[in-house]
C-alpha cells in the first residue's frame, strides 16, 4: 500500500498497517488531511495482504479533532436543503471503515471530537488512556449537528439516551465514562496502550485471514433483523468450514491439546501457540 503522505504516515508489518496522524497543532481535519485520510483508507481496503489497520496520533494530546470549521463555513448554502439518494464522501469514508474486510482499531491517547469522533465510531474497536482520552461532539453548540454519521453511529454504540447526552450536551466525555458506556473497548495507562493495542493487532493478524474477514462480516450482519443475521452467520460459517485454513487449524488445535482438560484450562495460550506454530 502507499505510505508517502504529508499529514500522516503509514507502516506495514506482519499484516498490520499502522497509520499515524500528524497535522499540527491539534489534528484538525483540514481538507488536505481529509483527502489523505480518504486515500489511506482506500489503500488499506484494497490491500489483500492486510488483516488489521491501527490508527493513532503523533500528538499525545489530540488524536483527531473536528472538521475544519473554516472549511464548513465555505459550504454552499444557496437554495433549500435537499435530500440525496447518495451518501456524501465523508459518510462513504466511514462506511468503508465499517465494511472493509480488515479489522480497524483506533488508539485514542488524547482528545477526539466532532468528525474525528464520528470517524473512530465507524471503526471496529477503540482504545483509550486512563485520565487522558476525551470525547466531545461540539456541533450542536455551533448550531449544526454531527453530520458525518455521528447521530446514527453513536446510538448504536452507547444507546439512544447516552447518545443524546453526548450530542446535545456538548460536554467532555472522560475516558472512564467512555469505557463504561461502551464507546471505548478498554482504557490503559499511557505507558501501556501502545503495547496493548499492538499485541492485539498482531494477534488478530496471525489468525486465518478468511476467518477474520468473514467474522467481521458476520458481526456487521447483527444490524439486520435477527432471522436474517442468523441466516448470514450460518452461511459464512459454512463457507469458512470449507477452507483449507479452517481444516488445518482445527486439526492442529486438537493435536496440541485442544479438548483436553489441561488444554482448555489455558485455551487462550493454546490458541496463541497454534498461531505461532504457523509462523
Image (tube, rainbow, N blue to C red):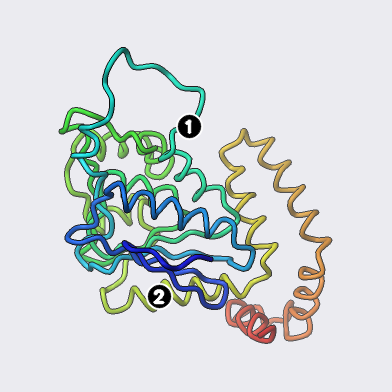
Task: Place residue 50 in its image quadrant.
Answer: bottom right
Question: In the rendered view of the protein, which quadrant contains the C terminus?
Answer: bottom right
Q: Report x, y in % for residue 16.
A: 52, 71
Element type at mark 1: loop
- 116 left or right, relative to 138: right
Task: Place residue 88 in its image quadrant.
Answer: top left
Task: Place residue 265 in its image quadrant.
Answer: bottom right
Give the residue displayed 39% in from the left and 63% down from the top. Answer: 55
Please identify, in this view, whether the residue under mark 2 or under mark 1 is nearer the observer.
Answer: 1
150 up-or-down from 272: above or below: above
Give the residue displayed 27% in from the left and 69% down from the top. Answer: 58
- 45 left or right, relative to 33: right
Which residue is the site of mark 1? Answer: 87
171 up-or-down from 199: above or below: above
How far apart marks 2 and 1 lie (CA) works out to: 35 Å
> Foreground: 101 or 128?
101
205 up-or-down from 159: above or below: below
Which residue is the site of mark 2? Answer: 196
Q: Is residue 107 visible?
A: no
Give the residue displayed 45% in from the left and 68% down from the top. Answer: 3
Answer with mark 2 or mark 1, whichever residue precedes in sequence.
1
Q: Report x, y in % for residue 121.
A: 39, 48
Amino acid at each position: 500500500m502507499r505510505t508517502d503522505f504529508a499529514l500522516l504516515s503509514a507502516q506495514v508489518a506482519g499484516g498490520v498497517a499502522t497509520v499515524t496522524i500528524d497535522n499540527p497543532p491539534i489534528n484538525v481535519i483540514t481538507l488536505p488531511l481529509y483527502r489523505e485520510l480518504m486515500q489511506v483508507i482506500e489503500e488499506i481496503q484494497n490491500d489483500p495482504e492486510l488483516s488489521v489497520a491501527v490508527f493513532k496520533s503523533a500528538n499525545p494530546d489530540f488524536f483527531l479533532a473536528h472538521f475544519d470549521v473554516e472549511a464548513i463555513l465555505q459550504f454552499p448554502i444557496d437554495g433549500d436543503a435537499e435530500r440525496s439518494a447518495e451518501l456524501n464522501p465523508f459518510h462513504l469514508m466511514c462506511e468503508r471503515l465499517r465494511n472493509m474486510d480488515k479489522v480497524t482499531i483506533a488508539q485514542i491517547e488524547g482528545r477526539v471530537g466532532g468528525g474525528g469522533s464520528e470517524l473512530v465510531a465507524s471503526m471496529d474497536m477503540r482504545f483509550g488512556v486512563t485520565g487522558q482520552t476525551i470525547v466531545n461532539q461540539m456541533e450542536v453548540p455551533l448550531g449544526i449537528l454531527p453530520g458525518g454519521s455521528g447521530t446514527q453511529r453513536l446510538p448504536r454504540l452507547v444507546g439512544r439516551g447516552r447518545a443524546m447526552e453526548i450530542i446535545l450536551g456538548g460536554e467532555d466525555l472522560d475516558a472512564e465514562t467512555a469505557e463504561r458506556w461502551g464507546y471505548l473497548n478498554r482504557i490503559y495507562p499511557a505507558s501501556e496502550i501502545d503495547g496493548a493495542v499492538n499485541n492485539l493487532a498482531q494477534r488478530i493478524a496471525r489468525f486465518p485471514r478468511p476467518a477474520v474477514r468473514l467474522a467481521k462480516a458476520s458481526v456487521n450482519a447483527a444490524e439486520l433483523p435477527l432471522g436474517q443475521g442468523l441466516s448470514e452467520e450460518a452461511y459464512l460459517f459454512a463457507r469458512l468450514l470449507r477452507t483449507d485454513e479452517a481444516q488445518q487449524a482445527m486439526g492442529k488445535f486438537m493435536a496440541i491439546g485442544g479438548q483436553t482438560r489441561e488444554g482448555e484450562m489455558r485455551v487462550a495460550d493454546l490458541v496463541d501457540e497454534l498461531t505461532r506454530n504457523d509462523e
